[in-house]
């Protein structure tokens, strides 16, 4: 045995793993034979509002906590840069004279404030007094089938166990500590925080940590201010209050409490209950003077949970979580190594080994993370979901809406977690209001606009601290328009006309009004373009060798606006309203600058055929029309699809974690399953401590978090989305069954994926061919399907073959559906 406090052996660990596997599904369990020594090895728990990273220490357990609404700052100012709009004519004049450098310089004068930062709540340390310096048979896990974490080890002949979950129904963190020997459990537990805080004794068995968040926090990449973190006195508007409460329940232990923490002696079992709350009361309310009573909220939650038996808390938690998680099942037939620790599995996989159940678990892990971090209306999943330990988090752990926030929600509909998008709609409602003020102040237009960053306060202005930001990322005006995609998509997947009328359409319409006012005629081509325009975070190379980022009519701008206009037109037709607006949008859509194929055969990123300054740049913004959009597909637009493929070949397969995840989705849309699978394997490359390389590394940490690096959760969600797209996607009005199945997944089964048109799809396949399809219809109408092999109808199905537009694409069918019915289709050959 090792005399390190960990004291493990692989054989003992495997024995512990096999014992645990009798209680849980090994295929849905991450497990390890050592405690975490760094944050990216700790295991994430969450109830959609409160998050925890569990390290699984023996003598000292560290649990790092977050609360979804705990941010720096306060409501956005009504006036940020009142002179911004006066510079717009000069920017456009410079652009149309092809003086791109001058346009860049002037555009910097049209910037506003930076977003605020998502903050860590604090740490809880549990220090156990153990009977022996040696520890053996160590085991820790995260069971994503029921969202529970377990740590177990032996010391001095006593088995110690810690079980933990975070309940959404009861809004409480629950930690049960047990000893196999009566009275052998002895520990102290105390909270702390990087924020300003004070500990008080709230009862004989209870302690409270109360504090205040900063009124302002600079992004981590801003280094020119002497005081990047600022606090203000009570009574000011900015800077929310917070409280964490902790109580212990033990039937046989002696409990004492003081301002250093809670101590338990002579117990056999003890339950720690923790609740947390902030004074955040909405994006437009001062969190201090108009804030909620965080003490009353946390206290009420704790008192209620304390009156509920542990078994009931656990049962409620599992029932709540599994109503979402159990909707989808995915299994692949082939090699697996669930009996090995997860980090060892990743290590072998990285070396080229096969592990199909690791791939299917990774898909489900993304679903687990989305359920765990996106159930708070006021706070969608941010750049790190809900898990962040840094006072100045990477990129403020904010909502980066030029790709990253959107990627968080790519799997929500197709992976049957539609409810998890509710927080995104809530943010959109707020952005439509703050963004209307930004549109008027910065551009003198109607409607609303949002740029590259936003936060819990729904900041909508171009960031950059009034000229210190680079326009290649700061001055991009399509963030709000892109987010509108999720509004129409939700209607498309559910057929919810009430949602379309009351929530989606007003926001989409207002965004379209901004775009109508924002578009201008390009003097050279006569088309409508955006000016100024950037392709997020990339630069082009001019013939004279200079690099620039500001132009007119970048492909991504045109694609997003075309999509928005078309969606608003279709929504207006469904609702039978705004005929005149629909006509105006159609006229404008017909005049938008079209897609262009460059001399190298790739899809042009800008309106001119300029090469990218960085050929293998991580962003592939100009492929928006391929994915997540639906304006380019191999069957409907083969020439453009070939240009998109050429773009991907030139960009290369490298990139950050999220970039590689994006490429998985695009290759799946091109129906090249083997290439998508190659990138999935590369995404699952084990990454260790590593450096913060912002551009070219990627990979996956030991806890299956995706590395940018550092950790960004969008790569996890993008990976889950990519796997979904390989199995099921909708392009050109067709539900495509197994459109990009890789050779490695020759035999398998998936149940519960959602398709547009309000259908749930189950599929099984063998030898790479579809053998059975079940359609659960939520809507009456016609369901259009495309299969790689011929299908025949089951007893109750009215299945009609259709004439294929492209014989190589597969076999199209029309299936008549009635809401509430289930239809089975079988392989015909």
Image (cartoon, grey):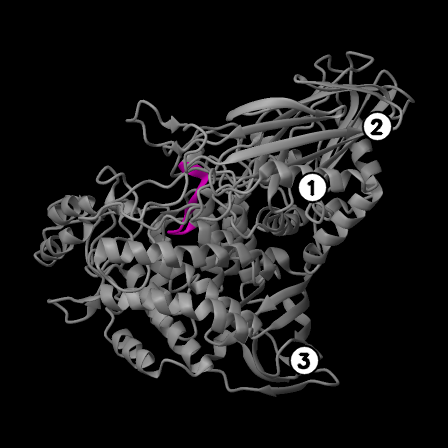
Contact flag, marks 1 and 3 (Cβ < 8 Å): no
Q: How many marks?
A: 3
Seen in the picture, residue 588 relative to 125 is either above or below; the reply is below
Residue shown at 72% from the left, 47% from the top? 27
| Horizontal arrangement in the rendering, residue 185 relative to residue 772 (left or right) | right
Provide the residue span drawn in magenta: 395-403
Q: Is residue 222 visible?
A: yes
Which x, y percent locates residue 416? 62, 62
Residue shown at 11% from the left, 59% from the top? 96
Q: Which mark is in front, 2 or 3?
A: 2
Quadrant assignment for the N terminus: top right
**Mark 1 or mark 2: whose residue is earlier in sequence:** 2
Label 3 sits on a secondary structure element that is loop
Contact flag, marks 1 and 2 (Cβ < 8 Å): no
**Mark 1 or mark 3: whose residue is earlier in sequence:** 1
The image quadrant of residue 345 is top right
In the picture of the structure, the residue carrying the numbered disc 1 is 301
In the picture of the structure, the residue carrying the numbered disc 3 is 828
């Amino acid at each position: 045995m090792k005399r390190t406090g960990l004291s493990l052996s692989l054989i003992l660990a495997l024995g512990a793993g096999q014992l645990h596997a009798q209680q849980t599904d090994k295929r849905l369990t991450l497990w390890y034979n050592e405690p975490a020594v760094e944050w990216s090895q700790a295991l994430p728990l969450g109830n959609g509002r409160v998050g925890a990273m569990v390290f699984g220490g023996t003598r000292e357990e560290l649990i790092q906590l977050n609360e979804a609404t705990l941010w720096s700052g306060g409501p956005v100012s009504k006036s940020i840069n009142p002179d911004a709009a006066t510079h717009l004519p000069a920017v456009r004049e410079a652009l149309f004279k092809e003086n791109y450098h001058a346009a860049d310089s002037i555009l910097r004068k049209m910037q506003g404030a930076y977003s605020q930062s998502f903050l860590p709540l604090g740490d809880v340390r549990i220090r156990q007094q153990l009977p022996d310096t040696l520890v053996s048979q160590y085991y820790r896990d995260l069971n994503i089938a029921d969202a529970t974490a377990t740590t177990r080890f032996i010391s001095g002949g006593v088995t110690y166990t810690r079980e933990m979950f975070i309940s959404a129904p009861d809004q409480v963190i629950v930690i049960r500590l047990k000893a196999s020997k009566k009275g052998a459990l002895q520990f102290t537990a105390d909270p702390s925080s990087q924020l300003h805080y004070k500990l008080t004794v709230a009862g004989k068995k209870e302690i409270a940590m109360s504090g205040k968040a900063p009124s302002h926090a600079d992004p981590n990449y801003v280094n020119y201010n002497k005081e990047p973190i600022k606090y203000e006195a009570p009574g000011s508007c900015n800077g929310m209050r917070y409280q964490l409460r902790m109580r212990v329940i033990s039937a046989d232990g002696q409990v004492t409490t003081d301002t250093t923490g809670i101590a338990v002696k002579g117990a056999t079992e003890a339950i720690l209950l923790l609740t947390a709350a902030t004074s955040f009361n909405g994006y437009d309310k001062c969190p201090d003077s108009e804030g909620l009573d965080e003490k009353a909220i946390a206290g009420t939650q704790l008192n209620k949970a304390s009156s509920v038996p542990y078994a009931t808390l656990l049962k409620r938690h599992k029932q709540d979580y599994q109503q979402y998680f159990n909707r989808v099942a995915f299994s692949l037939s082939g090699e697996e190594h669930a009996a090995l620790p997860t980090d060892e599995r990743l290590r072998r996989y990285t070396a080229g080994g096969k592990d199909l159940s690791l791939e299917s678990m990774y898909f489900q892990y993304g679903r687990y993370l989305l359920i765990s971090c996106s159930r708070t209306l006021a706070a969608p999943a941010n750049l790190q979901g809900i898990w962040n330990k840094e006072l100045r988090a990477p990129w403020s752990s904010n909502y980066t809406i030029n790709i990253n926030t959107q990627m968080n929600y790519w799997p929500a509909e197709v992976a049957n977690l539609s409810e998890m998008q509710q927080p995104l709609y809530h943010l959109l409602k707020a952005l439509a209001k703050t963004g209307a003020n930004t549109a008027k102040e910065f551009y003198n237009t109607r409607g609303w606009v949002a740029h590259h960053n936003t936060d819990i306060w729904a900041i909508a202005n171009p960031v950059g601290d009034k000229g210190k930001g680079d326009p290649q990322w700061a001055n991009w005006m399509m963030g709000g328009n892109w987010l509108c995609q999720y509004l129409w998509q939700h209607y498309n997947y559910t057929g919810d006309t009430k949602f379309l009328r009351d929530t989606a359409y007003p926001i989409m319409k207002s965004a379209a009004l901004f775009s109508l006012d924002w578009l201008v005629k390009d003097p050279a081509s006569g088309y409508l373009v955006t000016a100024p325009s950037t392709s997020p975070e990339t630069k082009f190379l001019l013939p004279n060798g200079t690099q620039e980022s500001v132009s007119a009519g970048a492909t991504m701008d045109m694609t997003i606006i075309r999509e928005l206009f078309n969606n608003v037109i279709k929504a207006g037709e469904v609702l039978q309203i705004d005929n005149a607006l629909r006509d105006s949008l159609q006229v404008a859509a017909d005049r938008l600058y079209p897609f262009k194929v460059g001399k190298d055969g790739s899809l042009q990123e800008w309106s001119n055929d300029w090469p990218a300054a960085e050929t293998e740049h991580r962003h592939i913004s100009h492929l928006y029309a391929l994915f997540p959009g639906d304006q380019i597909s191999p069957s409907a637009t083969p020439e453009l699809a070939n240009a998109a493929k050429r773009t991907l070949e030139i960009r290369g397969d490298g990139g950050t974690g999220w970039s590689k995840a994006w490429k998985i989705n695009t290759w799946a849309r091109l129906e090249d399953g083997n290439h998508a699978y190659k990138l999935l394997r590369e995404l699952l490359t084990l990454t260790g401590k590593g450096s913060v390389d912002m551009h070219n590394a990627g990979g996956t940490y030991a806890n299956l978090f995706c590395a940018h690096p550092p950790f960004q959760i969008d790569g996890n969600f993008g990976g889950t989305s990519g796997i979904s797209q390989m199995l099921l996607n909708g392009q050109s009005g067709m539900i495509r069954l197994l459109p990009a199945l890789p050779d490695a997944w020759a035999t398998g089964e998936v149940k519960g994926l959602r398709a547009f048109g309000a259908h749930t799809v189950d599929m099984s396949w063998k030898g790479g061919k579809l053998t059975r399809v079940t359609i659960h219809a939520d809507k009456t109408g016609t369901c259009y399907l495309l299969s790689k092999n011929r299908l025949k109808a089951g007893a109750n199905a009215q299945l009609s073959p259709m004439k294929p537009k492209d014989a190589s694409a597969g076999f199209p069918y029309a299936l008549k559906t009635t809401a509430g019915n289930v239809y089975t289709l079988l392989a015909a050959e």
